[in-house]
Image (cartoon, rainbow, N blue to C red):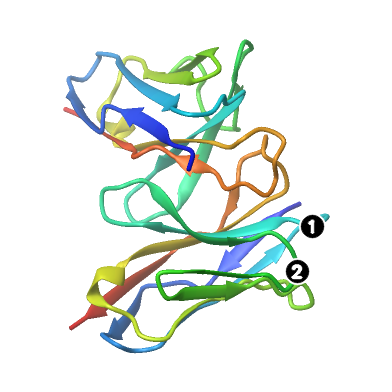
Amino acid sequence: GNSVTQMEGPVTLSEEAFLTINCTYTATGYPSLFWYVQYPGEGLQLLLKATKADDKGSNKGFEATYRKETTSFHLEKGSVQVSDSAVYFCALSNSGNTPLVFGKGTRLSVIA
Amino acid sequence: GAVVSQHPSRVICKSGTSVKIECRSLDFQATTMFWYRQFPKQSLMLMATSNEGSKATYEQGVEKDKFLINHASLTLSTLTVTSAHPEDSSFYICSASIPRDRNTEAFFGQGTRLTVV
């Protein structure tokens, strides 16, 4: 079946540090891949997505590249800010009528 | 972009009472919606799949008589927590996707923080 594995947190970084959150997946067919962000007390917001191999999703300085050969979709940001502190979820989808498959989430804390 | 609205965002109720949470797709028709529960500092746990015009599909271990789901229209699904107890206190989130489009992301409601006292 489909599954998503992402690095365990929490991750604590200083402001302006480089961020990588690893995500690998197992899926049948050709899934779409997503990163969602959840700020405290809120629902999930889409951060970025990629729908086919070698696609790069990007938003707000975050990037992730769909790597089919390594079944990975690692999230990166060159310089994090305190406002990036949140929980990040990697997810995949094979169909619009089935629920997303989520990783367990990675809590990021950025300190000034 | 598509929007999913969830209401209320926060509710406190007495033990033994029932609480209804609404999830609406504002600018698209959602034949399927999903209900999740999230415990503090944990990932989302899928509770059930809400299907318009038919019975919901519940995940293993989720009590269907406890968590009643009604998907009466293409834009509205409701989750009713019946005879709530303190252990039902949690963060509940709904989501919907544009049907038959695997490239589209899931759109999430803002979540409902339920506290049972």
Instruction: Check the picture and name the quadrant holding the C terminus of chain A.
Output: bottom left
User: What amino acid is at disc 1?
Assistant: Tyr
Towards the viewer: B100 or A106: B100
The residue that label 2 is drawn on is: A53
- Residue, x 53% and y 39% (percent of image)? B46
User: What amino acid is at disc 2?
Assistant: Ala
- Residue, x 41% and y 26% (percent of image)? B23
- Count all numbered tags in the image, as a single digit: 2
- Give residue A22's position: percent from left, percent from top: 55, 76
Q: State which chain disc 1 sits on.
A: A
Q: Is residue A26 left or right of residue A81?
A: right
Q: Is residue B4 left or right of residue A96?
A: left
When the figure is inspected, residue A61 is found, relative to residue B109, above or below; the finding is below
- Give residue B18's position: percent from left, percent from top: 29, 14
Q: Nearer the viewer, mark 1 or mark 2?
A: 2
Q: State which chain disc 2 sits on.
A: A
Quadrant location of residue A99? top right
Marking on residue B95: none
- Give residue B1's position: percent from left, percent from top: 48, 43
Q: Is residue A22 left or right of residue B11?
A: right
Mark 1 / mark 2, whichever is N-terminal: 1
- Residue, x 58% and y 60% (percent of image)? A49
Towards the viewer: B64 or A90: A90
The residue that label 1 is drawn on is: A30
